[in-house]
Amino acid sequence: MHSAYDKLRQNQINILQVEQGDAAKQSILYTKDSISTSELGSSDTSSTIRDKWGNEIEFLFSCIALSVGLGNVWRFPFIALANGGGAFVIPYVIVLLLIGRPVYYLEVIVGQFSSRGCVQAFGMVPLMKGIAYGQVYSTAVATTYYASIMALTIKYLLASFADILPWTYCRPEWGATCLATSDSLQEINSTIPTKRVSSAELFFTKSVLRETENLDHGLGMPSWDLVLCLLAAWILIAIILIKGIRSSGKASYFLALFPYVVMLILLWRALTLPGALDGIVYFLKPQWDQLLNPQVWYNAITQMFFSLAICFGTLVMYASFNNFRKNVYRDVIIITSVDSVTSILAGCIIFGILGNLAYETNSPDISSVVKGGAGLAFISYPEAIAKFKFLPQVFAVLFFLMLLVLGMGSNVGMASCVITVIKDRFNHLPHWLLATAMAVMGFMCGIIYMTPGGQFVLNLVDFFGCSFIALFLAIAELIAVSWMYGVKRLCQDIEFMLGVKTGLYWRICWALITPGLMFAVLLYTLITLEPLTYNGVAYPLNVYGVAWLLWAIGVAQLPLWALYTVYSMKGETLKEKFINSLRPCQNWGPSDPKLLVEYLLFRQQLQATQSHNELDHRTLWTKFYENIVG
C-alpha cells in the first residue's frame, strides 16, 4: 500500500502542471506540508495558502447572513404580492424542497470538496466553466442594485432621527388624496370614504426617489443625497471586504442574529393593527388553482435563487473556505429551513401591514392597496413603524439599521465571490486592491439607480441581468454536475470527504426532478414571454434591446468559454479535444496535496472493483440507472 502511495504521489509531482498567462507555465511542487508554485526558469517561489474560517460556526452564520438577507425581507414580499399572496407560498415551499435545498447542498459540497472558487471548481467539467463566469457576471450585476437598496436604507436611517418621522404626515404638494399615517380612523371614515394614498408611499415615490412615471424623457439627473448614501454603503462594504474572509466571518455573528430581534418586534406590532389578520390570511391562504400557473412557479424558482443565494457562485466560494472534513449536511438543513421561515415571517409582517392599510383606506383589494415593486419594503415597514405609540423613532432606527445589516450580509457575500474568482486567477494582486476596485466600480455603476428612473432600471436589471440568466445557467449547472460529471461520482466524492452515503432523495432531485422542473418552467416562460413592465408601464423599445444584450452577455459565457476550452485542450483531433474537455482536469480533487493523493488512490480502488468488460458492455439504461442509484 505504501509503495503504491509513494509511486502515485511521485507521479503527481511530475505531471501536474498549470498554464498561466500567455505562455508562462508553472509547475506545482508538492512538499510534505504545503503547496508552492514557481515559474519554470525562475528561482522565485511563493506559497499559496487559502484562507479558512476562524471556526466552523462562522460558515453557518456567514451563510445565514448571506441567504437570510434582502432576498427575504426586501424581495420576497413584493414578489409574493405580485403573485397573489397565498398563491405564491405553496409553490415556494415545494420549490424549496425540490430545488432550493438540493442545489444548496450540491454547491456547498462542490466548494468544500475542491477548495476552489466557483470558476476553478468547474475543473470537474472544464467544458462547462462558462457557467461559472456567467454566474459571476450575474452576481456582479446584482451587487450594484443591492447596494442601491442599501443607499435607500441609509437615507431612511438618517431620516429616522427627525423629531417627526417624515413619512408620517402629508405635504401640500401631494394633494388631498394623501392619507397621513398619524390620522385617526374616525377622522378618515367621517371625511373621505374613498381610496387614498398613504403618506409613506408618497414620501418614498415623491420625496426620496422623485420617481418619474415613465422613461419617455430619459432617466433624469441623480439625486445627489442618494448618491452620497450610495457612497457610504460601498465604503462600509469595502471595509469588510478589505479585511478578508476572517473579518466577514466575525461580522456574521451580528449580521445573522440582529435582524431577528427587530423582525419579531415588527411582527408583534403588525399583529396588533386592525385589519392585519385579513392581510396575513390573504398571504397564507392557499390558492390551489394557481398551482397550474407556470408564471407563479417561475417566480418561486427565481425568488429561491435570490433567497438562498444559489446559482450565483457565492455558496461555492464560501464553502471553499471550510475544512475538508466538515459535516455540512446539518448546516444545509439549518440554513435552508431558517431562510424559508424568515421569508414567511417577513411576509406576515408585510401583509399584516397591507391588511391594515386596506382597512384604513377603505380598499377591498389588499393586492392593490399600495404600488408593488422593489419599493414595497420602504412603504409598508415604515407604515407599521409610524403606528408605534411609544418612541417610533427608536424603532425606525432599529429597523433601517437591520435592513442595512441584511444588505451588508448579502452584498459582502456577492462581492467576495467576484473578488475570489479574480484572485484565484491573478493571485499576485493584493486583496485590498481588488476590494477597493470592486467598491469603486460598484459605486460608479450604482449611480444610475439614484435617478428618477432608477427603479425602472432596477426592475429591468433584476430580470434580465439576474433572474433570467440564473435560470438558464442553473439548468446547465445541474446537467454539468449531475450528468457530465455524474451523480454517481459526486456521491462517491461525498463519501470520501464526509464518510456518509448519499440518500435517494438527493440523487433523484439532482439528476431528474430539479433540472426537469426548472426546464419545464423555463420552456413555458419562453413560450409566453411578454415585454417587461414596471408597475404596468412599458419601457421604450430601445431599452428592451439593451436589456436583451445584458442577458446575452451572461448566457453567452457558456458557449464562448466552451469553444475556448476545446480549442486549448490537449489532443490530436477535435473529437479528442472535446472528449478531454468533458473529463475532470488533471489536478481535480482536494486542494491539499496529501488529500489529493488519497483521493486518487480512492478513485483507483473504486475503478478496480469493476472489470473492463462490465464497463464496456453496459447499456444506456444501465448507465442511466447507475448514475442515479449508484
Image: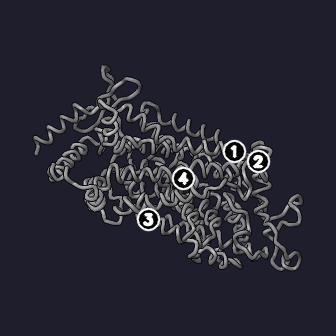
Q: Residues within 10 Å of mark 2 (few under 14, many from 20)?
A: some
Q: Which residue is mark 4?
A: 410
Q: Is residue 56 above or below residue 333?
A: above
Q: Which residue is mark 3?
A: 98
Residues at badges 2 and 3 in contact (C-beta under 8 Å)? no
Residues at badges 1 and 2 in contact (C-beta under 8 Å)? yes
Q: Single out the mark in the foreground, 3 or 4.
A: 3
Q: Nearer the viewer, residue 563 or 372?
A: 563
Q: Could you say whether the residue bearing mark 2 is in a helix, strand or loop? A: loop
Q: Which residue is mark 1?
A: 543
Q: Mark 2 is on which residue type?
A: Leu
Mark-to-mark CA distance, 3 and 4: 24 Å
Q: Single out the mark in the foreground, 4 or 1.
A: 1
Q: Mark 4 is on which residue type?
A: Ser
The residue at the point 32 percent across, 20 percent down is 42
Quarter assignment of residue 228: top right
Q: Earlier in the sequence, mark 2 or mark 3?
A: 3
**Residue 213 drawn at (x, y percent):** 79, 53
Q: Residue furthest top?
A: 41
Mark-to-mark CA distance, 1 and 2: 9 Å
Mark-to-mark CA distance, 2 and 3: 40 Å
Q: Single out the mark in the foreground, 1 or 3.
A: 1
Question: Does residue 260 appear to the left or right of 359 in the view shown?
Answer: left
**Residue 280 drawn at (x, y percent):** 63, 75
Q: How is the image coloured?
A: one colour
Mark-to-mark CA distance, 4 and 1: 28 Å
Q: How many marks?
A: 4
Q: Mark 3 is on which residue type?
A: Leu
